[in-house]
Image (cartoon, helix red, strand yellow):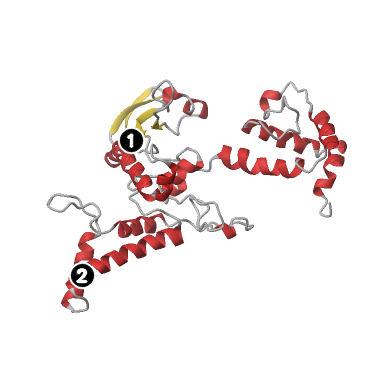
Amino acid sequence: TGTDGIQKSAMEPLVCTSANLKQSCRNDAKNWIVLGFVPNLELTSSATRRNNPVDSAADYHHCLSVLLEPLKQLQKEMPVMSIRRGRFLRDYHIIAPVATIIGDNQALDKLCGKISNKTSSSVRMSRRCLTPYGESDTIPHVCRRFPSNICQKLSMAALGVMYKGCVGQAESLVSPNLCGWEAFMEEQASNKSIRPDDWTAIREARERLARSVLRECLGSHAMENAFDGVDFGHDSSVHTATMTDIMHTLEEGIFKYIIGILLDPMSDTEKSKLDGLGKNRSGEREQYPRVNFTRGFSSLSHLSADERVGQLFVISILLRTQDGKSLFSNRFDPDS
């Protein structure tokens, strides 16, 4: 969201609404509750952000944690509110779990702390499932749920038992791992298994190991996620509540590639015939995807996401006609 005339400075709004409302009401900005704004943390160069992705994500979640604190407090206290139901007025406790989080895939990956990697080296292609790159096209798909609780514990271990502490401040906050770690080290020292001089080296080795497991096995950054402590309902977390971005995943992703596979190899003569078949007239056009193509039906450039859905919709109709089957027959011939 721009904050000046030339859109040089931007802030990211964090808003919420009620899932009890119908979709048209949820899409109305009048029904949005603005929790706050996250400042633009990408004012540094792209090279700096790529070199320190964990620091960038940690700063982003630190800002989010401040904005989410009122929501966490609401979920914890469950205050009473008088609500009218028909002709009756009743007092109800407000129970407000987060149902879903909407955004584009890049933003949702950042919310989950997921490492953005779509190459063959990716160990996790999905926010919800532990699906490596090599298994992403396996049918049928079997989802191995991402262990969010283990990820949170490993993140605390990777950040260190004193990651929140400040030397010289008796009241400073420390990691919840501190008491257990001190008890473990004191026990080892009493058994003379290790020397006190080795404590720091062992702690650092433990942090490196946890960070390596997060990166190499779970595909996650080591950071304190702002959504830890937010109620998402039974057996759910931020990793399951961040839904797939339909536009980039389907409309500008899978649909785009399917259409390209079908239309790219066609000759100009075949595309010209296809444009003639793709012309349509219908009084029910509002009930269907956009199928009015100003550059011709076979054009694959300068198309909006809605038009790509319309292209695939028209192709599905043409494949049920004799002329359409004749034009696309070579595209379905394994020997062609």
140 vs 47: above or below: below
Residue 159 visible in the snapshot: yes
**Label 1 vs label 2: CA separation?**
45 Å
The reply, left or right, for residue 181 in relation to residue 39 is left
Q: In which quarter of the image is residue 248?
A: top right
- The kind of residue tagged 1 is Ile
Estimate how packed mark 1 is, as few (under 14), some (14 to 19) or many (20 or more) residues with alpha carbons within 10 Å. some
**Closer to the camera in the image, 257 or 264:** 264
| Mark 1 element type | loop
Total count of labels: 2
Residue 191: % across, % down: 18, 79
Q: Which mark, by number, is residue 80?
A: none
Q: Which residue is drawn at 41% across and 27% down?
A: 8
Residue located 32% across and 39% down the image: 63
Vertical relation: 325 (above or below) 4: below
Query: Foreground: 118 or 282?
Result: 118
Query: Which numbered disc covers residue 94?
Result: 1
Residue under the point 42% across and 32% down: 18
Kind of residue at badge 2:
Met
Q: Position of residue 82 (x, y in %)?
A: 31, 27
Q: In this view, does 188 lie to the left or right of 47?
A: left
Question: At numbered mark 2, what does the secondary structure look like: helix, strand or loop?
Answer: helix
Instruction: Tell me the residue that label 2 is attached to.
Output: 185
* Residue 250 image offset from top left, x and y in percent: 61, 41
Instruction: Give the side of residue 105 with respect to residue 18, left or right.
Output: right
Which quarter of the figure is the N terminus placed in? top left
Answer above or below: position of 288 versus 113.
Answer: above
Residue 57 appears at what percent x and percent y?
38, 46
